[in-house]
Image (cartoon, grey):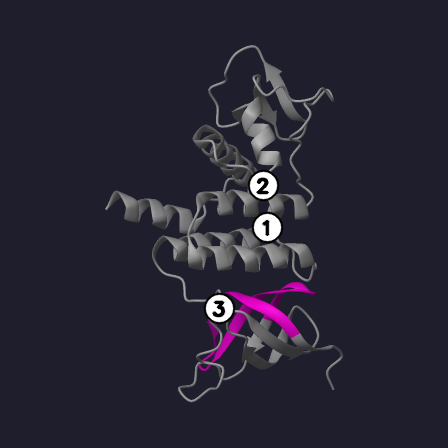
Amino acid sequence: MYRHKVEGQPAFVLHTYPYRETSLIVEIFSRDFGRVALLARGARRPRSALRGLLLAFQPLELAWAGKGEVQTLMKAEWQGGQPLLTGKALFCAYYLNELLLHLLPREDAHVRLFSVYAETLCHFATELKEADLRCFERAFLKELGYGLTLESDARGAPIDISGHYAYEIEEGPIRLPRPGKSALSVSGKTLIDLAHDDFSDPRSLLEAKQLMRALIAHYTGGQGLQSRRIFMELQEL
């Protein structure tokens, strides 16, 4: 008998890899259980009902059971409503999955992040905007307990919209006498715009991208994300 059973759980596939001759290990992001590893028995067989279902970026309803680090997938149903992603949108979605795989602990529920993830995929399918990436990154870091200090500096003083700051990762914004030159250097306006998810100013969008990239590199221990590297290589081509 299985010691643990879950039914009717909304989820997305983050990554799959072969297991033995006919099965798959499936890393999923579920609404109520966070990131979970599942064994999909026989999913690689040509006639398997699971073969065409376990696709990334498609909303699924899953059932699983078992104990230990890898449990057994019992059922998968496609929920529909999410167009297939192509081109830049597809690479951006892979980037989101890499973030979740690198930094999200197993079996740690993040219901709000699940909702933001699903909404971001919908935005990617209709109109890809760089601002959607920045919004997801900020929500993601906040959910992990790495929320950014954006409306006051490290000393508690309100951010000056015309000021210049260096973002100290463990402290927050530090006021500078003049614009800095590092990726962690931002204007006061960028901090305020980021706090309100307002990226209509091109400068705020650029500085927010540089800041987020530096923060994520810090929290991933400097590990280069494959999706970003591949995307940059394709742009060069």
- Residue type, label 2: Tyr
* Drawn side of residue 215 relative to residue 109, left or right: left
How many marks the image carries: the answer is 3
Under tag 2, what secondary structure?
helix
Is residue 71 shown to the viewer in this render?
A: yes
x and y, in percent, of residue 70 in the image: 62, 71
Dominant secondary structure of the magenta stretch? strand
Tell me which label, 2 or 3, sits earlier in the chain: 3
Under tag 1, what secondary structure?
helix
Report if the CB atoms under discs 1 and 2 are less than 8 Å apart.
yes
- Residue 170, quarter of picture: top right
- Residue type, label 3: Thr
Q: Which residues are magenta?
A: 9-37
x and y, in percent, of residue 131 in the image: 49, 43
User: Is 42 placed above or below 37 here?
Assistant: below
C-alpha distance separating marks 1 and 2:
8 Å
Q: Check residue 204 in the rendering and tell me which mark sits there, or answer none.
A: none
The residue to which callout 3 is attached is: 16
Structural crowding at the residue carrying mark 3, measured as other residues with C-alpha within 10 Å and reported as few (<14), some (14–19) or many (≥20) = some
x and y, in percent, of residue 167 in the image: 59, 26
The residue to which callout 2 is attached is: 219
Furthest-bottom residue in this view: 47
Structural crowding at the residue carrying mark 1, measured as other residues with C-alpha within 10 Å and reported as few (<14), some (14–19) or many (≥20) = some
* Drawn side of residue 237 relative to residue 22, left or right: left
The residue to which callout 1 is attached is: 103
Give me the residue at 51% from left, 40% from top: 222
Report if the CB atoms under discs 3 and 1 are less than 8 Å apart.
no
